[in-house]
Amino acid sequence: MKTNFLKAVFWEYPQFRKEDILLKKSRLKKDIDLLRWLMIRFLENGRVADTIKYFSMDEIAQHLPQLRLSCQKRKEWSGLTELYCGN
């Protein structure tokens, strides 16, 4: 069920747990700051399988240098994007 993993991603923001409206809005308006904030939420708190439902590995690789992530998550996602994208 979609809301189960959204609870993990947006654990302190219950208003964002129901749908992926913010992600659609950020892409429609080309709001890079909102898109990156959402990406950080997924990269830090979500499972890989759920994260790649919303963000492609190329998209993650593109934004990864600008994202404020924990050292461990940055290392994990850098390794994944290198493996899948060759970056």
Image (cartoon, rainbow, N blue to C red):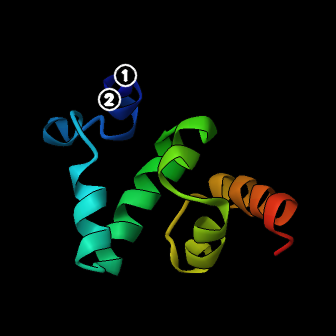
| Residue name at image x 31 percent, y 26 percent | 3
Judged left or right of residue 34, residue 50 is: right
Toward the viewer: 14 or 18? 18
Q: Residue at x 51, y 72 (%)?
A: 67
What x and y, as percent, mark residue 85? 80, 67
Extreme residue toward the front, this view: 28
Q: Which mark is residue 54?
A: none
Mark pair 1, 2: CA separation: 5 Å
Asked whether disc 1 touches disc 2, contact meaning CB atoms under 8 Å apart, the reply is yes
SS assignment at label 1: helix
Q: Residue furthest left?
A: 15
Quarter containing the N terminus: top left
Instruction: Report the residue marked by disc 2.
Output: 7
Q: Estimate the x, y position of residue 53 in percent, counting from the top left.
A: 52, 44
Hey, what amino acid is under mark 2? Lys
Q: Position of residue 71 (x, y in %)?
A: 65, 60
- Quarter where residue 81 is shown: bottom right
Q: Residue at x 59, y 66 (%)?
A: 60
Residue 24 place in picture, x, y as percent: 28, 59
Q: Give the vertical position of 31 relative to 13 (above or below).
A: below
**In which quadrant of the rendered image does the C terminus lie?**
bottom right
Secondary element under disc 2, as helix, strand or loop, is helix
The residue shown at (73%, 52%) is 76
The image quarter containing residue 18 is: top left
- Pointer 1 residue: 4
Q: Tell me if mark 2 has few (under 14), some (14-19) or many (20+) residues whose alpha carbon lies within 10 angstroms of its own.
A: some
